[in-house]
Image (cartoon, rainbow, N blue to C red):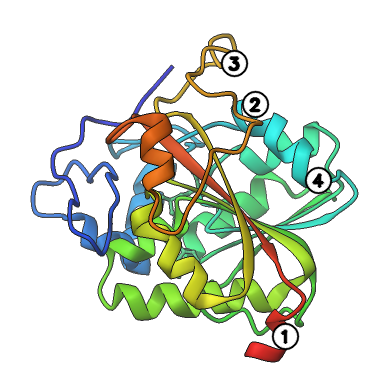
Amino acid sequence: MRTKKPMTKMMGNATCGTKMPTNSHPTTTTAAYGESWYWDKRYASSSSGSGSESEASFDWYQKYPSLAPLLHLYIPRHHRVLVVGCGNSAFSEGMVNDGYAQVFNIDISSVVIAAMQRKYSSCSQLKYMKMDVRDMNAFEAGSFDAVVDKGTLDSILCGNNSQENAAKMLQEVGRVLKDRGIYLLITYGAPNYRLHLLRNSCSWTIKLHVIAGKLLSEETSQCQAWDLTFPVPLDDDGISTEAVLGKNPDVHYIYVCIKDKKHESTI
Ligand SMILES: C[S@@+](CC[C@H](N)C(=O)[O-])C[C@H]1O[C@@H](n2cnc3c(N)ncnc32)[C@H](O)[C@@H]1O
């Protein structure tokens, strides 16, 4: 299985809290991950086959089969799902092949959206739209039962004005979700980097799950330190999580944020 290039620069600061791999170009830093021009350029080179990523699709962090048991737990297959910052990931295709009936996808990159619209033109369960997750006014409030985010909040947190942009994004996610809707956030960010952001943006009940951090093949996805479907104890500062998993564990964190009814009166 193909994996990302080794990480050449780590975003170790408290804002990002994210270890995302950098582009192979030596002058590009992870700050560009918050910019649409960066993604357009990356996806254009990926589709032409001339760049460092010539594959037609790439999944950050995890592929669909590894996370499917968690989706089954929280998102019924007939629910209306929005995948934000879908990129050219095969995750949504995986959901549809697994029986999910309505999967909407947005991305800020017009290049990748055009490619995905072409690729899935005959799949009625999948819709692709170019949209900025910070401004989803094309969707009415309460339009979705679930929002899935794999790596998009992380990208925004690497960019300029990261806190402001992340807050806008999370407010919009809260707005487009129905009462008791689920925001499923798959991220490198540990609770001490993500919890305050989530809690300041919307009124959520939050559960935390973890999965081993390497891109796992379907065959090896059983080998996990902590059972994916068991929530990890979570307190306000993430200390309980550290007590269970140790310091800096090699995991991806999955925050299951359930929108509280009272959210509507707080915005
Ligand atoms: C790290 S990639 C993750 C792609 C995909 N979700 C996956 O798991 O493979 C981040 C994606 O977020 C998109 N993105 C970044 N900022 C965005 C924004 N403001 N609105 C919508 N999409 C955005 C990028 O174009 C990119 O496709």
Tags 2 and 1 in contact by the CB under 8 Å rule?
no
Judged by depth in the image, the label closer to the viewer, 2 or 1, is: 1
Lower position in the chain sequence, tag 1 or tag 4:
4
Residue for badge 4:
122
Hey, what amino acid is under mark 2? Answer: Pro
Q: Is mark 3 within 8 Å of ligand 1?
A: no
Lower position in the chain sequence, tag 4 or tag 2:
2
Hey, what amino acid is under mark 1? Answer: Glu
Hey, what amino acid is under mark 3? Answer: Glu
The residue depicted at 15 percent of the width and 55 percent of the height is 28
Image location of residue 246, percent across then percent down: 33, 30
Cα–Cα span, label 2 and label 1: 34 Å
Cα–Cα span, label 3 and label 1: 40 Å
The residue depicted at 39 percent of the width and 42 percent of the height is 46
Q: Nearer the viewer, residue 75 or 218?
A: 75
Tags 3 and 1 in contact by the CB under 8 Å rule?
no
> Where is 147 relative to 72, above or below?
below
Tell me which corner region of the image, top left, top right, bottom left or bottom right, holds residue 53.
Answer: top left
Residue for badge 2:
65
The quadrant of the picture occupied by the N terminus is top left
The residue depicted at 65 percent of the width and 26 percent of the height is 65
Residue for badge 3:
218
